[in-house]
């Protein structure tokens, strides 16, 4: 019995060590492929490694995007909303994709988006390309490109491409 308890404790500690947490600034660039229109926003991101993500924008001030458990709240580019992701399938998928990408679980993000993943490593960075196999699930992404710093597993860049041609890039600093 003692061995089981010791093993369970060791497993929990090792899982906690791999949970990525973030407290950093970011720049978000949103590009409409059809028109070429680009919008740049800046802010601060905090992530607890599980299911709490908070993005507070300084440019433009007052905008935010928050995941708090299953709740998703936002005030972004004229859209104000508060939704329970368990009740809205496309919000559930977007929530899961963001949290999985930030926590380093790109395999699950690819599976959720009916996609393949390709991983390459070069000069201290791991690049993961997730590309949809066919029809993208509603709320899913056509492609996701993630760049992780190998030494600590932190995402330094995340590019999300929606089926409608909107590409959003997050640069973390």
Image (cartoon, rainbow, N blue to C red):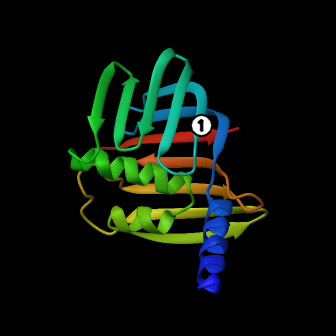
Q: Which residue is mark 1?
A: 46
Up/down of 96 relative to 85, above or below: below
Quarter holding residue 2: bottom right
Name the spot of residue 129 as percent of width and height, x first: 51, 63
Up/down of 7 relative to 155, above or below: below
Q: Nearer the viewer, residue 114 or 9?
A: 9
Q: Would residue 99 be found to the left or right of residue 148 on screen? A: left
Residue 34 visible (yes or no): no
Quarter holding residue 87: top left
Up/down of 60 relative to 151, above or below: above
- Residue positioned 65% across, 62% down in the render: 18
Q: Image quadrant for the C terminus?
A: top right
Residue 166 visible (yes or no): yes
- Residue positioned 31% across, 23% down in the render: 79
Q: Nearer the viewer, residue 101 or 5?
A: 5
- Circle 1: is it few (<14), some (14-19), or many (20+) Cα within 10 Å? some
Name the spot of residue 159 as percent of width and height, x first: 51, 48
Quarter holding residue 164: top left
Up/down of 66 relative to 98, above or below: above
- Residue positioned 41% across, 53% down in the render: 97
């Amino acid at each position: 019995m003692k061995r089981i308890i010791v093993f369970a404790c060791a497993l929990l500690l090792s899982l906690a060590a791999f949970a990525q947490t973030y407290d950093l600034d970011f720049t978000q660039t949103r590009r409409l492929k059809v028109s070429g229109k680009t919008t740049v926003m800046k802010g601060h991101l905090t992530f607890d490694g599980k299911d709490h993500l908070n993005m507070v924008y300084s440019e433009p001030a007052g905008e935010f995007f928050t995941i708090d458990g299953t709740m998703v709240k936002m005030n972004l580019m004229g859209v104000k909303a508060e939704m329970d992701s368990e009740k809205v399938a496309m919000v559930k998928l977007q929530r899961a994709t963001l949290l999985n990408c930030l926590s380093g679980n790109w395999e699950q993000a690819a599976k959720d988006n009916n996609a393949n993943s390709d991983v390459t490593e070069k000069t201290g960075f791991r690049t993961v390309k997730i590309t949809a196999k066919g029809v993208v699930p509603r709320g899913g992404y056509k492609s996701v490109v993630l760049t992780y710093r190998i030494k600590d597993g932190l995402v330094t860049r995340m590019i999300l491409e929606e089926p409608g041609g909107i590409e959003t890039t997050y640069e973390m600093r």
